[in-house]
Each structure stands twice: as structure tokens, then as C-alpha cells.
Image (cartoon, helix red, strand yellow):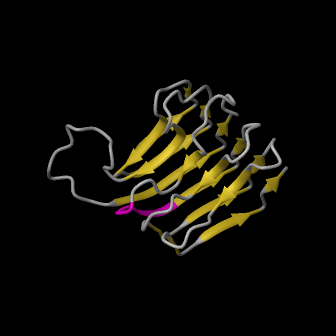
Amino acid sequence: DWIIERVNIGTSYYHGLEVDQSRRITLNRCTFSGARTSTSGSSVQFDNNLAGPVNRPATITTTLVEDVRFSDCRFAARPDTDTYARDIDVNHAAALTLRNVLFEGCVFEGRALADTTIVGFDANAATVESIAFSRCRFVTTHPKADAIYLANALTVVRRLSVTDCIFT
């Protein structure tokens, strides 16, 4: 198991955290802040070997990301110069299966930029078996920005749960 506590994940080129073919990860009271300076950067990206490390052993063949928990984390607003649409990129790779992801007590601060989203699902054939948001707060600051964006016919989402959350 991986446990990451009270860590500030600041400016990076691509992603603040890329969860790639992993399981049993817990982040407690972490802050994601700063810019993602690449044209495809997000604060968190769930992935499956689309472009990650090139030195991955050939024995790692799983397409599963499982049991990831974010508890009382803060996702600070990225600068408006960050033009990549999603802050949390749920399913970056088509072969990905995402299972048992929980955000609880988290604060998500969107950008004051049109056509951006805090939590976004890519238009690919990934499978999201369960993702949940409990007691979270979503703050969007532009009238043409989304808190959660799921608008494609390719991704299979079996269970998306939003409970006791605040959207402003």
C-alpha cells in the first residue's frame, strides 16, 4: 500500500500525479497547486501505459487502476494560462479499467476559463467501474466551465456516485 500525507504537489510539466497501472493508493490532506505547463497537463491523471515511463518492465501487463482514495485533499485553481481542459483526467487510455476510486472531503477549485472542467472523462473506450465523490466542494468560476463533464458514448461508467457535495 502507498500512503501519501500532507504533501503539496506544485507546478509540473505534465501531471501533478499520474496513477498508471496501480492499486491501493491513499492520499490524505494533500494539496495540488501550481501550473501544469504542458499542453496536456492535469492535476491528476488515471492512465494505462499510454505515454508514461518507457522503462516499465514487460511483466507489467495489467490494465487496472484500483482502490485509490483522496481524503481531505485540496485541488487549487490552476492558472488560467493552463489550457488543458481537465483538472482530474479520469480515463486517459482506452484500455484502462478504473475501479474503486473515492474522493472524500475534497475541495476542487476550477479555473476562470471557458471550456474547462474539474473532473472530466475522455472520449475513449475505457471502463470506469466505480468512482465516488462524498462531502466534496466543487467551485467553478466561469459560466462556461463544468464541475463534472461526462459527455461521450464510448466510456462505460458503471457507477458514478456523488453524495453530500456542494457545487458553487
**In the image: residue 41, left or right of residue 135:** left
Q: Which residue range is magenta in the image?
A: 94-100
Which of 134/111 is in front? Answer: 111
Which residue does the image show at 49% across and 39% down from the upper left? 40
Residue 110 in the image, given as x and y percentages of width and height: 72, 41
Residue 107 in the image, given as x and y percentages of width and height: 72, 43
Residue 75's place in the image compared with 62, above or below, is: above
Which residue does the image show at 46% across and 57% down from the upper left? 67
Place residue 51 in its image quadrant. top left
Residue 23's place in the image compared with 98, above or below, is: above
Residue 91 in the image, given as x and y percentages of width and height: 47, 57
Which residue in the rendered view is the most extreme toward the left? 58
Which residue does the image show at 31% across and 49% down from the upper left? 49
Which of 85/103 is in front? Answer: 85
Which of 128/81 is in front? Answer: 81
Which of 94/7 is in front? Answer: 94
**In the image: residue 78, left or right of residue 65:** right
Place residue 135 in its image quadrant. bottom right
